[in-house]
Image: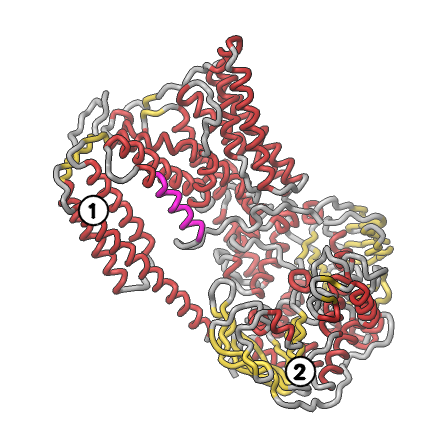
Amino acid sequence: MSAGQTSKVIDKARERHSLVVGVILIVLAVFTAWVFGYGTVGDATFRLAMRGDSFKVGDLVVPAAPYAYVVAAILAYFGARLMMRSGSRRANLILGIGLILFITAFLTWATADHSFSLTGMLKSTIIRALPIAFGGLTGVLCERVAVINIGIEGMLLAGAFSGVVFGSLFGGWAGLAGAAMTGGLLGLILAVLTVTYRMDQIIAGVVINIFVLGLTSYLTSQVLAKEAFRHLNDAPVFRAIDIPYLSDFPIIGPLFFQHNLFVYAAFAMVAIATYYLFHTRTGLRARAVGEHPRAADTLGINVFRIRYIQVTVAGMVAGFGGAWFTLGSVGRFDENMTSGRGFIGLAAMIFGRWHPVGALAAALVFGFADSVQQKMALLQTPIPSEFLAMAPYVATIIVVAGLVGRARPPAADGKPYVKE
Amino acid sequence: MEVELRNITKRFGDLVANDEVSLTIQPGKILGLLGENGAGKTTMMNVLYGLYSADGGEIFVDGKPASFASPKDAIAAGIGMVHQHFMLVPVFTVAENVVLGVEPTGALDRLDLKRAREQVRDIGAEYGLEVDPDALIEDIPVGLQQRVEIIKTLFRSAEIVIFDEPTAVLTPQEVKEFFQIVRSLRDAGKGIVFITHKLGEIIELTDHVKVLRGGRVVGEGDPKIMSQVELAELMVGRPVDLVVDKVAANPGKAILEVSGLKVLGEGGDVAVDNVDFDVRAGEIVGIAGVQGNGQTELIEAITGLRSVADGSISFEGEDITHHSPRQVHALRIAHIPEDRQRSGIISDFSIAENMALDSYYEDRYGRGVTLSWPQINAQSAKDVFEFDVRTPTIFNAASTLSGGNQQKLVAARELSREIKLIIASQPTRGIDVGSIEYIHQRIVAARDAGVGALIVSTELDEIMALSDRILVMYRGRIVKEFAGGGSDVTEIGMAMAGVAQ
């Protein structure tokens, strides 16, 4: 029977996959022992306590070379096991654990004889992940109803700009509202172009990016730079709010509960979006529209309306997230200050498999790489920190290319719906 | 519930799809709508279902005038439709698909999937339509998917259920089960509309039949007392011959030899699994099977469109396993592809351009880098006339042709040149009975002239009518071989369903 044949083929694919993962792990093990272990002296000191903690915790002191050897041994064990007992279903999980171990060994090696604040680095991971998470969430919302949104970058930038202008004029909350409205307006424009006029979705998104970049750059350099208008580029910044009790916990407190509004909002939005998409009636309909719009249409669901509403709301999320650049951090706008975070948000969406939580997790990975790179530059390791900054994008390419299990976009993604 | 459609007219531009058609759907009765593709059957039902708005005429529900602006209105009025192409979301579960649009919810718009599952089970128990509510649509066979479509209509408390060409995707065995389901729905008092172009199904199943041609009702009656020939003549509008006239084949030596062929499908699965067969000169070999059992991949492998994983294909002794489509074409092998829209024509090109699409590189159509338009146009005009492709000129875009005429265009291009082997997938899909006759005659005439033919069709009737030998494909393998003519349909049907002998 070919059913048996088919499963045999799958087995073969799995066998090859776990063999590849096994080899990767062994290579990592050798690398860890050779580079991170051999000839490394001293202890790595990770400071866990933050300034202003109510309870102080001690430092985490790790002897660098022995730790590297332990990690290398574990990696080698995993690798050998995968190669010998090939066909394991858990190859990807093991690879993930292996990579995390490898990264800890790398950090220990880089910090040997030095010390740095681990909690601080993780905290900055969250902050750096923030705009990417907002961008990723926007992408998830749009593509779940089959509208590709390349314009996330522009929406973030527009949010940052209008946030600072409205914020300077009427205060921070008005800035937030203005940013969300501007993002929503751009979402609405994208919906008009792609849903009603069936314009090529990639081009529509690119148009939005170029338009917003040009307009905000012009206004910044020609208008806001003038003495008479300088007060428009000076908005109040949302300060960190300590959550009572929770923020007093060591490590966890500073990591999660001493942030400003944007961080809490991001986590809340991801939770709400997950609930909405997968547990509500409207969410089911929206996903149906993204997978098989004609089926939805024959059941009396208004495909166009759902696309319009969801893309507009997604634009509002991007606008809100864009406001973080100004209202959430520096209080002023600079040309092109989003510097590609929206595009990375799209990558996070794919990496996160079109799931809000996945997109957030992917954003955290990107944010982590970003903040490690910063620290490494300070610690003066022999590896150029730029290489590290590349790592997450290499990972994205591997995921998108389908090497680690195929990520499947909504079936109708990018296709305009034509009513019969 | 009784629904009456009175004098419905629907136009698409200049085309009149429905011209003052009237019909009545009664509870507890099965109404058959018979007609060729393009006769206006589906248009009629789409008007009733609210997908199209009629340009004229009225709809009455239980004697009261009604109008349906969208499917939502029609559903609310108790009308359900099972579309020819299922309207199911593949990555959703059965329960999610059933409740979509009328979901049971709790507070905060929360989906109540538990209740949805129970409701699906209840309907299944009531009408004998058991399906696992948690199965993903993409994981269940077509027959079950159709059940889900029926459950969908019942879940919306449909009193009228419309079936649009429901048997096209089913095996003969599944068709039997399906008829049973339809009968039980009728006995439960539902009004049924059964759209088809298959005469046998009308006679077997329906209580009353309306025959449509060119958008008009051309006849109606009790199918129990009407004969197939009578119905066919009404449908086509002239006397037709339902059997293909042919003398016994006189096969020569094998020209196409396939041995140990293994081809992978789209997802890397084995689609064609260790297949051996040959086609001799002067014979027609038919491959029967339900859609998706490897026929597509087999044909693509032979014609060079898909790479071969293992085994070999040879033509007149020459190994063509790894030939490109051009090389295959140059060997005088004709290919009528399964999906004309996707791989048979370029719809924005003119008819003449499409006619030259395969042979443009040959000397008869040009010299060096230039094309010889007079030659192309002359040949196209001749082919269009011969194959009765209905078009004002050969310069119209192929997209302006109806589906049946597009199919004739492809057949004309492939069969009019000098050939040694015909490979045809669904050669008569969606065309009228008259043209089917003609294409069949051409294939048989080619056979009599010593050309070999390999025909793939999911229409068992077509396979039976044409083939000198019948191979049955099931899950990528050739499971059984029958002699053409006089073989038992039931036995072939069993083989198609994979029932072990």
- In front here: A288 or A6? A6
Colouring mode (rainbow / by chain / secondary structure / one colour) = secondary structure
Percent x, y of residue A170? 51, 13
> How far separated are the C-alphas under marks 2 and 1?
68 Å
Q: Is residue B393 visible?
A: yes
Residue B42 in the image: above or below residue A183: below
Neighbour tally class for label 1: few under 14, some 14-19, many 20 plus, Cα within 10 Å: some
Q: Which residue position is annotated with label 1? A: A35
Q: What's drawn in magenta, residue-wise?
A: A389-401
Q: Secondary structure at mark 2?
A: strand
Quarter of the rendering containing residue A372:
top left
Amino acid type of the residue that numbered disc 1 sits on in the rendered structure:
Val
Percent x, y of residue B488? 64, 85
Percent x, y of residue A303? 63, 43
- In front here: A120 or B9? A120
Taking the image as shown, residue B393 lies to the left or right of residue B323, namely: right
What residue is drawn where x is 60% and y is 40%?
A203
Percent x, y of residue B65? 81, 46
